[in-house]
Amino acid sequence: MKEIVLRILRLFLGLFLFAVGIVMTINANLGLAPWDVFHQGISNKIGITMGQASIAVGVLLVILNGVLGERLGWGTLCNMVFVGLFLDFLMLNQLIPVFESIILRLVMMALGLFVIGVASYFYIGAGLGSGPRDGLMIAFTKKTGRSVRLIRNSIETSVLVMGYILGGFVGIGTLIMALTVGHFVQFAFKILNFDVNTVEHRFIDEDIKLLRRMLSKSKTDADAN
């Protein structure tokens, strides 16, 4: 039980920090990351918050991932809901500052990318499944046999174009983030001495099977008595 509680706490710390990092890159006002361009475009078109747009896209991706045969973890579902909720909490309450200086905005964006890297350490390290967007990348990689780099670039380019058409903000920061976010995540992992390959994820279907076995054993024991 203690291990489960610690994993859940680690998961939610990671999700909250992930939202903090995203808001920092948004408030840098230099252009949004590809998925955030898409979320903002949806937000602008139908009059919802970016957090709500993130949740709506996450729901669709979870459904698509399930159809494509990707296993879902509790962390996948939590990512789908809570990153969006944390985004709205931070943005609507203006908890992350906005700067006028271009230097401070660049620093803000860089710090945001580093925070996203640290958040990934906590979130992935919880071992409760990948996020909906990473799950889509994994699913298409398995289905097509293409490289992760090609699939990821194709997905992010597609959502970037759709987001731009919908009115999402594209700027120099969009290009910087697209080219450097992987390096920031890798840098955070190196500092924290984290090897993502050592993580063993726990999936929802495993917990359902375990619950069924426990219920079956309880019923057998009851019948025996």
Image: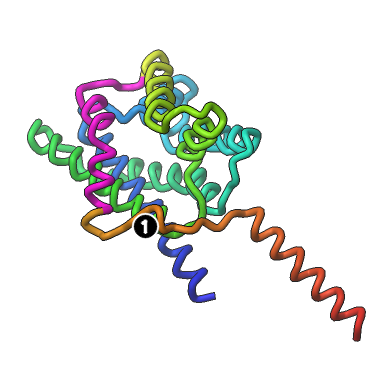
Q: What stretch is highlighted in magenta?
A: 168-189
Front position in the image: 196 or 41: 196
Residue found farthest to the front: 145
Residue 53 placement, left or right of 208: left
Q: Quadrant of the N terminus?
A: bottom right
Check if residue 187 falls in the magenta segment. yes
Front position in the image: 193 or 170: 193
Label 1 element class: helix
Q: How crowded is mark 1: few (under 14 residues within 10 Å), some or many (20 or more)?
A: many
Q: Where is residue 30 in the image (x, y as percent from the top left)?
A: 20, 27
Q: Position of residue 69 (x, y in %)?
A: 63, 38
Vertical order, 150 against 135 (above or below): above
Residue 219 placement, left or right of 121: right
Q: Quadrant of residue 134?
A: top left
Q: What residue did someone put label 1 on? A: 122
Residue visible at 46% across and 35% down?
Answer: 54
Residue visible at 52% across and 69% down?
Answer: 4
Residue found farthest to the bottom: 225
Vertical order, 141 against 113 (above or below): above
Residue visible at 20% across and 34% down?
Answer: 28
Count of number-bearing discs: 1
Q: Quadrant of residue 206?
A: bottom right
Residue 216 placement, left or right of 70: right
Q: In which quarter of the image is the C terminus?
A: bottom right
Q: Where is residue 149 in the image (x, y as percent from the top left)?
A: 37, 30
Vertical order, 118 against 55 (above or below): below
Residue visible at 27% across and 53% down?
Answer: 189
Three-letter residue code for mark 1 = Phe
